[in-house]
């Protein structure tokens, strides 16, 4: 692995290349990690591609099917931004990542994650309309409305990713150049900064409110409307049927929230 090209700025040496620590530094585990990660990645691709193929069927042209396809494509894209680079490093033991490569990876990860949150909120809105305003469902959620919700989700994700990436890489990153993670993400990059990051952390909190809290509140509001409507249904079978249409979406939201909390809500202490 060639040494990183560096440039001096004041008393600090700015980084132009990074080294990802990966999942483990133990050589005897690299092949096991490669095959395990490759298997999980293959299953991720296969499962999401299967959803895309199944929901293309002419009888499955509802808004929920449309958003399921979008969600599957976002999952495929997120995994493909991170995993191939990780697999290559496990095989070659070259864990370097260029400055441009790190910027691109961070931008894509933030864009896809933010967009996925808003797509989940759009799916919750779809379920609330289906349960609470079933008679006007087709008129409210027309194909034009689907596309508008998707474009709004993508536009929000784009704005957030541009701001987050720009904020991180305007900080002076001066080392050490080893990122203690398996891809370029915001928390491990902040550790490399040799300047005060308190201002950025305040901006990060604001962005977190926009990215996570806003769609999360929209999801809660949608399900509050759903629960209120279901409780007014007299038949137990009808209540069960109405709630069962939301179970898959609730499962996805729970898994997404839980995995995000495990990664980003850990205490700073070791």
Image (tube, grey):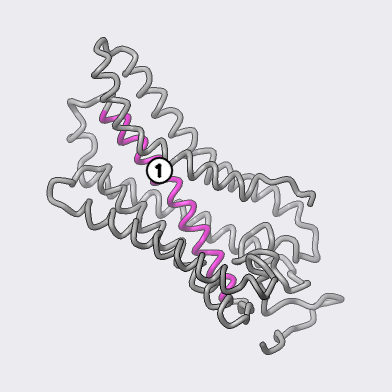
Residue 188 placement (x, y as % from top left): 69, 61
Horizontal arrangement in the rendering, residue 173 relative to residue 230 (left or right): right
Residue drawn at x 57%, y 41% is 209
Q: Is residue 129 magenta?
A: yes
Residue drawn at x 65%, y 67% is 169
Q: Nearer the viewer, residue 91 or 79?
A: 91
Q: Name above or below for residue 102 compared with residue 113.
A: below
Q: Nearer the viewer, residue 142 or 124?
A: 124
Horizontal arrangement in the rendering, residue 135 relative to residue 44 (left or right): left
Q: Which residues are magenta?
A: 101-130
Horizontal arrangement in the rendering, residue 209 relative to residue 3 (left or right): left
Q: Name above or below for residue 219 compared with residue 260.
A: above
Q: Residue furthest top?
A: 234
Q: Is residue 165 magenta?
A: no
Residue drawn at x 55%, y 71% is 86
Residue at the spot of label 1: 120
Q: Nearer the viewer, residue 236 or 229?
A: 236
Residue drawn at x 52%, y 58% is 110
Residue 170 placement (x, y as % from top left): 67, 66
Q: Residue furthest left?
A: 58
Residue 91 placement (x, y as % from top left): 56, 79
Residue 40 placement (x, y as % from top left): 46, 61
Q: Main secondary structure of the magenta part?
A: helix
**Quarter holding residue 187:** bottom right
**Which image quadrant: the N terminus?**
bottom right
**Quarter holding residue 171:** bottom right
Q: Residue furthest bottom?
A: 2
Horizontal arrangement in the rendering, residue 126 relative to residue 143 (left or right): right
Q: Considering the numbered disc 1 on the image, is that residue within a helix, a strand or a loop?
A: helix
How many neighbours does mark 1 have within 10 angstroms: few (below 14), some (14-19), or many (20 or more)? many
């Amino acid at each position: 692995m060639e040494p990183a090209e560096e440039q001096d700025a004041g008393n600090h040496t700015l980084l132009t290349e990074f080294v990802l620590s990966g999942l483990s530094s133990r050589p005897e585990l690299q092949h096991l990690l490669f095959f395990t990660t490759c298997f999980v990645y293959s299953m991720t691709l296969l499962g999401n591609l299967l959803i895309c193929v199944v929901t293309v069927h002419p009888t499955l042209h509802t808004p929920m099917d449309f958003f399921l396809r979008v969600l599957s494509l976002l999952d495929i894209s997120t995994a493909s931004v991170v995993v191939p680079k990780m697999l290559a490093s496990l095989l070659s033991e070259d864990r370097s990542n260029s400055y441009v490569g790190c910027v691109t990876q961070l931008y894509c990860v933030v864009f896809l994650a933010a967009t996925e949150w808003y797509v989940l909120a759009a799916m919750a809105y779809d379920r609330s309309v289906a349960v609470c305003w079933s008679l006007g469902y087709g008129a409210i959620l027309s194909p034009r409305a689907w596309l508008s919700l998707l474009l709004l989700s993508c536009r929000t994700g784009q704005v957030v990713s541009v701001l987050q990436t720009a904020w991180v890489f305007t900080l002076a990153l001066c080392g050490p150049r080893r990122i203690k993670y398996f891809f370029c993400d915001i928390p491990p990059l902040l550790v490399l900064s040799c300047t005060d990051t308190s201002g950025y952390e305040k901006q990060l909190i604001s962005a977190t409110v926009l990215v996570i809290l806003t769609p999360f509140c929209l999801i809660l509001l949608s399900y509050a409307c759903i629960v209120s409507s279901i409780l007014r249904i007299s038949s137990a079978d009808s209540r069960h049927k109405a709630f069962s249409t939301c179970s898959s979406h609730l499962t996805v939201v729970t898994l997404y929230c839980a995995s995000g909390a495990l990664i980003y809500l850990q205490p700073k202490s070791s």
